Amino acid sequence: MNAEVKAAVAPEKKEFWRWQENTWFDESRNWRDGSIVTCGIDVGSVSSQAVLVVDGELYGYNSMRTGNNSPDSAKNALQGIMDKIGMKLEDIDYVVGTGYGRVNVPFAHKAITEIACHARGANYMGGNQVRTILDMGGQDCKAIHCDDKGKVTNFLMNDKCAAGTGRGMEVISDLMQIPIAELGPRSFEVDEEPEAVSSVCVVFAKSEALALLKAGYTKNKVIAAYCQAMAERVVSLLERIGVEEGFFITGGIAKNPGVVRRIEKLLGIKALDTKIDSQIAGALGAALFGHTLMQKQGAKKAA
Amino acid sequence: MIANYGYKDGSGDYYISIDTDKCIDCAADRACQTACPKEMFETITDDYDDEVTWVKRANCRTLAYDCTECKPAGGYTSLPCTSACTPGAIRHSW
């Protein structure tokens, strides 16, 4: 008698927090026709982006999750876009690193803070009317004022507390077992808008969310309460430096309408729209800085 | 540029603001850097190639504690950093 024994296999754990990595390039142009190719690499705490700018215009980008070391994350992000367009590192005239891992981008010619880069990137994405920028990153949040050229005039950041960051939203996504991209739309599927969760700490917000579920809240209502808490949190940061018309949101949470619409309601102004991925603002700004630096050096390739 | 260094947490807002426009050609010869008992300030070249003072990264997340002994309970009637900064570039939020 052959008794078949099967090893118990644990069910694969779904990772609801995983956001979509993506690559894009402008198929209507050929980078070989350009005279200056610059690259911005933003190695953030959660995501890494490589952006290519040809003659001062966005050409392509790759956005992916940050790995366990910054140099590899930078290389992988850039390789992802270079492979798609048949480019080699030596084809790039200037590389600027930004983000938390900016000093660990091995092939960068210069490192510039993410604050300056986000302002420059937002100025490109939202136009020269952008004055107030809210960057909701993976593990920090920044409020920035800039002038019509994208130069920073006032900034403030909070990287001590995860409340109001992308990581906080990922925690709620996993807790609710709902894909992170669905959180925003589902936060509006409620009969009435709930009060924001009271905790300003991600760890305690998680406990509070569980308590609300036990108290009979639907998942959507808990998500709505969390989106509202996040909006209130970042608005309090913005109010410290003041909000001017020409409001623009960068970072991954800009893709979450549940948070964005609630921020707009609290501020009483609408955020400027863009067709460009909000997550690449920092890397795009870095690449644009690279372009300006190349122009200053007058180091153009022979046409 | 107004640069705000510090953080906000459940206990409150703790930011030191530096007006770098007043800081570029410092009339006080960067006296804030020697006045601060914790030596929190240092000169850097910022993203726009200006030499300005900033709060060291290591102190940005612990300002509430680092500045405690200079606050009224520590016996100071005015903050050493803001007093030393005669151009008036430095402000505390708390």
Image: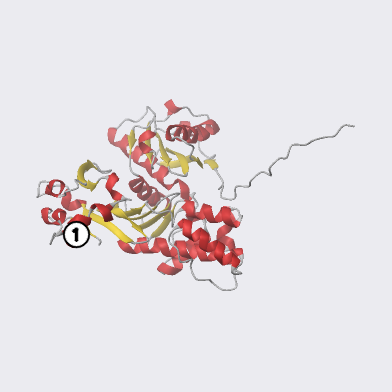
Colour approach in the figure: secondary structure
Residue at the spot of label 1: B71
Q: What count of labels does the image hold?
A: 1
> Can you give x and y, in whole percent of width and height, for residue A80 in the image?
52, 34
Residue type, mark 1 in image: Lys
| Viewer-proximal residue among A210 and A166 | A210
Which chain hosts label 1?
Answer: B
**Which residue appears farthest toward the right when viewing the image?**
A1
Q: Is residue B78 above or below residue A48?
A: below
Q: Is residue A146 visible?
A: no
* Up-down relation of residue A126 to residue A211 (above or below): above
Q: Is residue A213 left or right of residue B69?
A: right
Q: Secondary structure at mark 1?
A: loop
Which image quadrant for residue A9? top right
Residue A77, can we see it?
yes
Quarter of the picture holding the C terminus of chain A:
top left
Residue A103: where, in percent of width, then height? 35, 35
Q: Residue at x 49, y 29 (%)?
A: A87
Image location (x, y in percent) of residue A17 = 56, 50
Quarter of the N terminus of chain A within the rendering: top right
Query: How many neighbours does mark 1 have within 10 angstroms: few (below 14), some (14-19), or many (20 or more)?
Result: some
Looking at the image, which residue is at 45% across and 69% down? A265
Measured as percent of width and height from the top left, residue A41 is found at 42, 38
Q: Which residue does the image show at 22% across and 41% down from the upper left?
A: B44
Please tell me which residue is depicted at 34% across the width and 48% down the height of the picture.
A115
**A7 left or right, relative to A30:** right
